[in-house]
Amino acid sequence: MTEQAVRPARMIRPPRGNATWPGIVATLGPEGTDAHAEALRLFGQAVLVESFDAAVRFAYETRTSALVAAGFVERSEEAVADLWVDLHFRNLERMRMDQVWVSPTKQMCVATSQTADPATARSVALHPATAVFADRFVAAGARRQFVDAKPVAVRLVADGRADCCIGSVDVVRRYGLRIHQVFQPTMIWCLYSPIPRPDEPERTMPNRC
């Protein structure tokens, strides 16, 4: 393993106000995810892909950056399909974590159709990372339908394929669903970039503490 591969990441505050970091960043889509919002807030251009793994692969292949949520869990039905720690370790030889920071997510909520109630829901659509909010606010016996991004969960309720969901408030309003509990947790974000090849210049990101 190269020395660059284990270079520690800097704990920073992201740019404030209208300041942005230069360049392109790949992150989890579709439009409306927290990752999308954070990417738009900090970068000049965001590329939305189907998974954080795809974002890292895109960044490596195009020599750009990838924005990844620390600790993410990706599920396929009930089975765990990917974990942040696995993604991090399997890319040690070719990607480095440049920076890490904490910032609020968009406002989240429990949402249903206009006539439903989370207390009597038979199913809940959710991203695996939001399961703790289903534990708090949704009927204990509700069947969990795991999805890769919160906007997908919202669409399942809008299409009548789930009784309730954990979604972002702005996306829920776009679909005309009923909003119940509202909350806004924080998220830890990691910025990855390719380890420079011998013929590439060192890439640096400005520290805007």
Image (tube, helix red, strand yellow):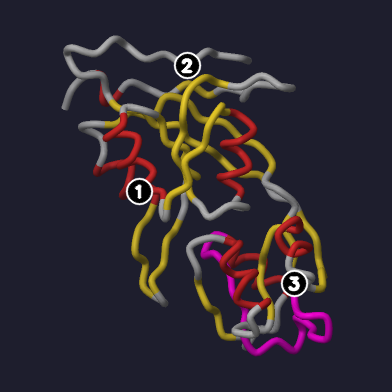
Q: The residue under label 2 is which amino acid type?
A: Met
User: What kind of residue is marked 1?
Assistant: Ala
- Considering only order in the chain, which callout, 2 or 1, is on the residue closer to the N terminus? 1
- Hey, which quadrant is residue 144 in on the image? bottom right
Q: Which of 134 and 59 is in front in this view?
A: 59
Q: Which residue position is annotated with label 3?
A: 111
What amino acid does circle 3 point to? Ala
User: What residue appears at the point 27 percent right and 35 percent down from the top-left corner?
Assistant: 61
Q: Name the residue under label 2.
A: 205
Answer whether residue 124 is magenta in the image.
yes
Give yes or no for residue 182 being in the magenta stretch.
Answer: no
Seen in the picture, residue 103 relative to 178 is either above or below; the reply is above
Task: Indicate which label's residue lies in the foreground, 1 or 3.
Answer: 1
Disc 1 marks which residue? 54
116, above or below 86, in the image: below
In the picture, the quarter occupied by the N terminus is top left
- Give the residue drawn at x 20%, y 32%: 93
Query: Closer to us: mark 1 or mark 2?
Result: 1
Q: Residue at x 31, y 31 (%)?
A: 62
Magenta part of the chain: 112-129
